[in-house]
C-alpha cells in the first residue's frame, strides 16, 4: 500500500514539471528576448534588450513585412522590420519592469514572441540597533534590528549568536521585511556574567551588509515576567496604612510601583529594593478609587524592567468628612405673617466627603430662643420650611458619613435684597460659547469697602426636566466678573442675580442671559380677545420653553383691517412687563380687524402666531341725546308752569279716560232709609239717633261721584262771590289752592238738620235725575241754591228735601254755561259720561262725608 502511494506521488510531480516546460516552450516558440548585463541591476544602470525571430517563424503570407515591436509594459518603445531588434533602456525605476516583444504581420494583428522582467534595486544597508532579549528565566533569546531602507529585491537576513565555550547559534529569515528573529535558545543564570555576541547579516543579488556585533550578558538581556496576584489591604480599615502585596520571580531585586486616582491622568511612582512582594503605602486618600501597577528587574543597575503588571483597581476606606458645606437660600413671602425658606447646598468633593454621605442634618433656630426650634435629617441637597416673618433666624447644615460629620455651616436668614446701598451696579450677562456665560458688574459705590463676598446665582427661567432649581458660585470682593458654566444649556434663558454680602446684610441686582440664542421658532398663541372699558384686551399663551430659543425681549402685536392691503400697525411690549395679556386702545368700533403676535430675542423675530379676527362693537353717543332732552324738558316745564295749559292738559287726559273708569252716582232714593221715612216739609231728626248711626263701626257704603258741579250760595253770602272763570274745572281728585273757588260757611247747629223750603233747589233730585245721557244744559239756574241733607244710616240714605227738588223741565240759565268747562271727547274708549267736575275732593266721595243743608253745601 505504501509503494502504491509513493508511485502516484512521483507520477504527479512528473506531470507538473512537464506542463511547466511545455508552457515555457509555448511562451517563446516564435523567438527569444535577451537582457544584458543581467535581469537584476542597480538603480541608475542601463540594460540592453534584444528580440530575435526563430527560423520560419515570421509572417507566412508576407515574409518581407516582418516588423518587430518592443513594449515596456503596454507602451511601445521601439520597432524594426526584419528578424532582429535590439534596444538600450536607461532610467528604470526601483522594482520590476516587464518588457514584451511582438511581431506585426498586418496593421490589425500582432503576435507575441517573448518577454523579460528586469528588477532594479539597491545593495542592503548595514542593520542598525541590534538588541537581544530573553523574557523570563525560562524564555528564549529574541533579537531585533533596523533593516534600513528597502532594497526592492529579495534580501536574506542571517542572525548569529556566539557564546562561551565557542558555542554558536544562527538562524536565517526569509521574510521580505525581516527585522527580528527568535533563536529558540534559552540562556541560563548559571553564568550570569558570561558574555554573548550577536550579529545579523543582510544579503541580496547586488551585495551584502553586516551589523556591528552586540555583546551582552545574561543579566543584561533577561526581562523578568510581570508581577501577578496583586492585592491591597488597609490596616484597621484606615488609609493611614495600606499594604500592597504581589508575587514575583525569585531573581528579582528591584521593584517599582505606580498608582493614581481614577479621576487623575498622572501617575505617582515609587521604587522599592528587595521588597519581596510587599510594600506599605501611607499617603492614600480615603474613599478614593485607585489604580495600581508593579514592574520588576533582576539587578539594581543592569537589566531590563519587566512589563507593567495588570492594573489593580480598588477603593480605599472612608474617613470622617472634612470642611463645611456651601449653603445658599431663598425666601418667599406666603402672607403677612409667614415666609417660606428654601435651603440649598452643594455636594461635597470626594476629598472633603471622604466617604459616602448618608444624610444631612438641618437645624433651624430663632436667635432670641436658646432651644433649637426645628431639626431635620434629609438625604437631598435642599430643604424647605415655613417660619414666621418676625424674629431673626439661623440655620445650620452638616453632612454625615459612616465615620462622622462635618462642622456645621451657619447662615443667617435675612432679606437678600434688603440693603440697597450694597446692590451691585451695571449687572450684565454675555455669551462666551455654547455652555458659558460671562457675568460682569460694578462695585456698589461707597459701600464697596464693606463687601466681604459676592455670590452669583442663576437658575433657568423656564425649568425643563431634571434641571437643578438653583446654582451659585462665590467670588472674592475684588472681582467684578464671573464665568458661569455649571448646568448651562444653549438656547435656554437664565435669571442671574448678583448678591453683595456684608455681615448679615445683602444687596442684589439681577439680569437675564443665555449662552446661545436665535429667533423663536413660533409666535405666541392668542387665546382670547375681549372688550374692556372701550379697549381691546388680548390674552395669549406663553411660548413653550423649548421653542423660545433664548431670552425673550419683546412681544409684538400686529393688527390691520380685514381684507386690507395696507401695512399692519404694531404695538411692542417688553416681555417682563406683560407676560400674557395687553390692551390696545386705538381700534375703531364696528371695524373687523385681524390680529396676530410675534416674539423677539436678540437674534431676531419669530414667525407670526395664530391670527384672530375681532370687531369692536359700537357704543351709543350719549352727548347726542342729552342736549336735546334737556332743551325739551326745559320747554315742557315752562309750558306747564302756566295755569291755562295745565287745565287744558287735565281736560285732555279726562277725555282720554276709558269708559270703564267712569261710574254713575247711585240713586239714594232706592235706599232702605228713603223708603222708611216719609217726605215732610220740615223734618227734624233727633240728634241722638243721628249720632248713634254715625258711631256705628260698620263701613258705610261707598258712593263714587265722578262729576260734581261747583256752586256757591250767593244769596246767603253775598260778600263771597268766588265764581270760577269760564272753562275752569277740575278733573278727578286733583284740586289746587289757586283753582279752589268755594268757601264753606259755618255749619248749622248739630241738634237738628232743617230743610228750608222755598230757598234751596232740591239738589238730590238734580243729581238723581242725571242719567248716563244727561247734559249740563238741563241743570237749574246757578243762582238757585240746591241743598240736600244726605244722611247715612244702617238701612240706606235719605235726603231731607226730596219734595222741593226742581223738575227736569225747568230751563237752565245761560250763566251755567259759563261755569261749565269745555268737553273734548278724544277717547278711543266708549263713554257715557265725560263731563268734567267743577270741584274736586279726594279720590272717592262717600255720602257719609257729604252734608247738605238749606244754607250751605260743604264737604
Image (tube, rainbow, N blue to C red):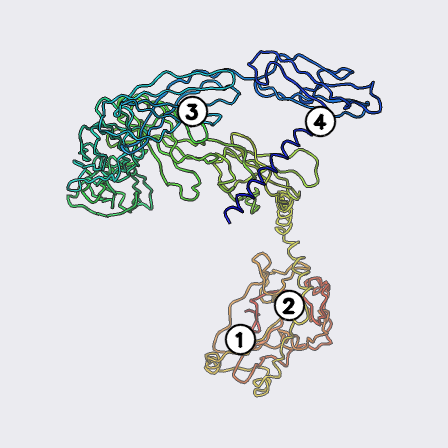
Residue placed most toward the observer, 145 or 46 = 46
Mark identifier at residue 709: 2
Disc 1 on helix, strand or loop? helix
Depth check, mark 2 against mark 4: the one in front is: 4
Disc 3 on helix, strand or loop? loop
Disc 4 designates what residue?
A: 29
Rendered location of residue 42, percent (x, y) = 55, 14
Disc 1 designates what residue?
A: 848
Residue 392 seen by the camera: no
Disc 3 designates what residue?
A: 179
Q: What's the distance in space between the residues labelled 4 and 1, CA to CA? A: 174 Å
Q: Quadrant of residue 213?
A: top left
| CB within 8 Å, label 3 to label 1 | no
Q: On screen, 26 above or below 793?
A: above
Q: On screen, 726 above or below 517?
A: below
Q: Residue at left 24%, top 22%?
A: 194
In primary-sequence order, the first of circles 3 and 1 is 3
In primary-sequence order, the first of circles 4 and 3 is 4
Amino acid at each position: 500500500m505504501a509503494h502504491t502511494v509513493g508511485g502516484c506521488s512521483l507520477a504527479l510531480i512528473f506531470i507538473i514539471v512537464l506542463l511547466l516546460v511545455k508552457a515555457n516552450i509555448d511562451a517563446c516558440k516564435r523567438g527569444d528576448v535577451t537582457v544584458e548585463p543581467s535581469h537584476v541591476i542597480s538603480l541608475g544602470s542601463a540594460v540592453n534588450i534584444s528580440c530575435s525571430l526563430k527560423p520560419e517563424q515570421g509572417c507566412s503570407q508576407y515574409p518581407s513585412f516582418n516588423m518587430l515591436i518592443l513594449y515596456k509594459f503596454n507602451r511601445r518603445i521601439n520597432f524594426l522590420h526584419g528578424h532582429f531588434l535590439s534596444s538600450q533602456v536607461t532610467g528604470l525605476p526601483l522594482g520590476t519592469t516587464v518588457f514584451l516583444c511582438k511581431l506585426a504581420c498586418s496593421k490589425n494583428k500582432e503576435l507575441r514572441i517573448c518577454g523579460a522582467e528586469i528588477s532594479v534595486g539597491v545593495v542592503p544597508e548595514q542593520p542598525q540597533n541590534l538588541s537581544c532579549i530573553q523574557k523570563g528565566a525560562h524564555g528564549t533569546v529574541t533579537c531585533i534590528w533596523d533593516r534600513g531602507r528597502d532594497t526592492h529585491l529579495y534580501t536574506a537576513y542571517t542572525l548569529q549568536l556566539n557564546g562561551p565555550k565557542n558555542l554558536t547559534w544562527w538562524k536565517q529569515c526569509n521574510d521580505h521585511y525581516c527585522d527580528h528573529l527568535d533563536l529558540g535558545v534559552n540562556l541560563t543564570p548559571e553564568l550570569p556574567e558570561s558574555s554573548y555576541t550577536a550579529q545579523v547579516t543582510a544579503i541580496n543579488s547586488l551585495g551584502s551588509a553586516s551589523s556591528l556585533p552586540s555583546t551582552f550578558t545574561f543579566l543584561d538581556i533577561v526581562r523578568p515576567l510581570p508581577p501577578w496576584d496583586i492585592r491591597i489591604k488597609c490596616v484597621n480599615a484606615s488609609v493611614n496604612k495600606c499594604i500592597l502585596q504581589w508575587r514575583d520571580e525569585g531573581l528579582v531585586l528591584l521593584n517599582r510601583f505606580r498608582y493614581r486616582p481614577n479621576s487623575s491622568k498622572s501617575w505617582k511612582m515609587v521604587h522599592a529594593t528587595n521588597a519581596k512582594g510587599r510594600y506599605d503605602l501611607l499617603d492614600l486618600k480615603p474613599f478614593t478609587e485607585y489604580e495600581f501597577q508593579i514592574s520588576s528587574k533582576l539587578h539594581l543597575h543592569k537589566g531590563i524592567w519587566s512589563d507593567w503588571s495588570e492594573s489593580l483597581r480598588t477603593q480605599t476606606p472612608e474617613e470622617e468628612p472634612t470642611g463645611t458645606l456651601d449653603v445658599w437660600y431663598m425666601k418667599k413671602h406666603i402672607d403677612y405673617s409667614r415666609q417660606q425658606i428654601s435651603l440649598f447646598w452643594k455636594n461635597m468633593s470626594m476629598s472633603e466627603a471622604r466617604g459616602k454621605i448618608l444624610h444631612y442634618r438641618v437645624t433651624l433656630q430663632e436667635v432670641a430662643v436658646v432651644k433649637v426650634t426645628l431639626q431635620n435629617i434629609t438625604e437631598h441637597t435642599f430643604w424647605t420650611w415655613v417660619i414666621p416673618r418676625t424674629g431673626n433666624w439661623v440655620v445650620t447644615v452638616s453632612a454625615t458619613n459612616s465615620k462622622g460629620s462635618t462642622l456645621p455651616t451657619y447662615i443667617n436668614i435675612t432679606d437678600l435684597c434688603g440693603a440697597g446701598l450694597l446692590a451691585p451696579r451695571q449687572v450684565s450677562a454675555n455669551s462666551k460659547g455654547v455652555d458659558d456665560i460671562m457675568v460682569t458688574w460694578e462695585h456698589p459705590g461707597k459701600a464697596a469697602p464693606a463687601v466681604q463676598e459676592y455670590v452669583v446665582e442663576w437658575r433657568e427661567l423656564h425649568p425643563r426636566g431634571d434641571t437643578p432649581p438653583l446654582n451659585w458660585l462665590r467670588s472674592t470682593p475684588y472681582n467684578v466678573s464671573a464665568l458661569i458654566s455649571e448646568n448651562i444649556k444653549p438656547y435656554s434663558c437664565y435669571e442671574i442675580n448678583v448678591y453683595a454680602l456684608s455681615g448679615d446684610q445683602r444687596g442684589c441686582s439681577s439680569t437675564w442671559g443665555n449662552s446661545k440664542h436665535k429667533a423663536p421658532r413660533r409666535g405666541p398663541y392668542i387665546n382670547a380677545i375681549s372688550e374692556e372699558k372701550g379697549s381691546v384686551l388680548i390674552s395669549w399663551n406663553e411660548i413653550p420653553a423649548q421653542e423660545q430659543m433664548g431670552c425673550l425681549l419683546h412681544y409684538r402685536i400686529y393688527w390691520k383691517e380685514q381684507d386690507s392691503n395696507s401695512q399692519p400697525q404694531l404695538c411692542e411690549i417688553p416681555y417682563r412687563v406683560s407676560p400674557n395679556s395687553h390692551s390696545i386702545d386705538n381700534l375703531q368700533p364696528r371695524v373687523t380687524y385681524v390680529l396676530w403676535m410675534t416674539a423677539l430675542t436678540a437674534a431676531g423675530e419669530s414667525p407670526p402666531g395664530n391670527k384672530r379676527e375681532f370687531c369692536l362693537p359700537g357704543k351709543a353717543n350719549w352727548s347726542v341725546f342729552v342736549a336735546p332732552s334737556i332743551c325739551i324738558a326745559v320747554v315742557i316745564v315752562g309750558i306747564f308752569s302756566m295755569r291755562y295749559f295745565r287745565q287744558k292738559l287735565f281736560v285732555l287726559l279726562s277725555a282720554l279716560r276709558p269708559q270703564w273708569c267712569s261710574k254713575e252716582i247711585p240713586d239714594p232714593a232706592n235706599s232702605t232709609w228713603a223708603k222708611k221715612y216719609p217726605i215732610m216739609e220740615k223734618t227734624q231728626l233727633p240728634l241722638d239717633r243721628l249720632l248713634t248711626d254715625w258711631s256705628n263701626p260698620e263701613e258705610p257704603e261707598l258712593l263714587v261721584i265722578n262729576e260734581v258741579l261747583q256752586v256757591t250760595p250767593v244769596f246767603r253770602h253775598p260778600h263771597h262771590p268766588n265764581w270760577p272763570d269760564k272753562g275752569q274745572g277740575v278733573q278727578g281728585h286733583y284740586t289746587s289752592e289757586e283753582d279752589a273757588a268755594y268757601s264753606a260757611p259755618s255749619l248749622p247747629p248739630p241738634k237738628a238738620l232743617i230743610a228750608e223750603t222755598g230757598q234751596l233747589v232740591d239738589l238730590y233730585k238734580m243729581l238723581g235725575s242725571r242719567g248716563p245721557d244727561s247734559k249740563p244744559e238741563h241743570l237749574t239756574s246757578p243762582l238757585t241754591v240746591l241743598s240736600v241733607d244726605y244722611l247715612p244710616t244702617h238701612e240706606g240714605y235719605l235726603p231731607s228735601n226730596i219734595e222741593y227738588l226742581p223738575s227736569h223741565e225747568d230751563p237752565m240759565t245761560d250763566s251755567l254755561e259759563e261755569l261749565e268747562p269745555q268737553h273734548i271727547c278724544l277717547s278711543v274708549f266708549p263713554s257715557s259720561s265725560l263731563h268734567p267736575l267743577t270741584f274736586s275732593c279726594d279720590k272717592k266721595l262717600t255720602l257719609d262725608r257729604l252734608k247738605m243743608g238749606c244754607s250751605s253745601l260743604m264737604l
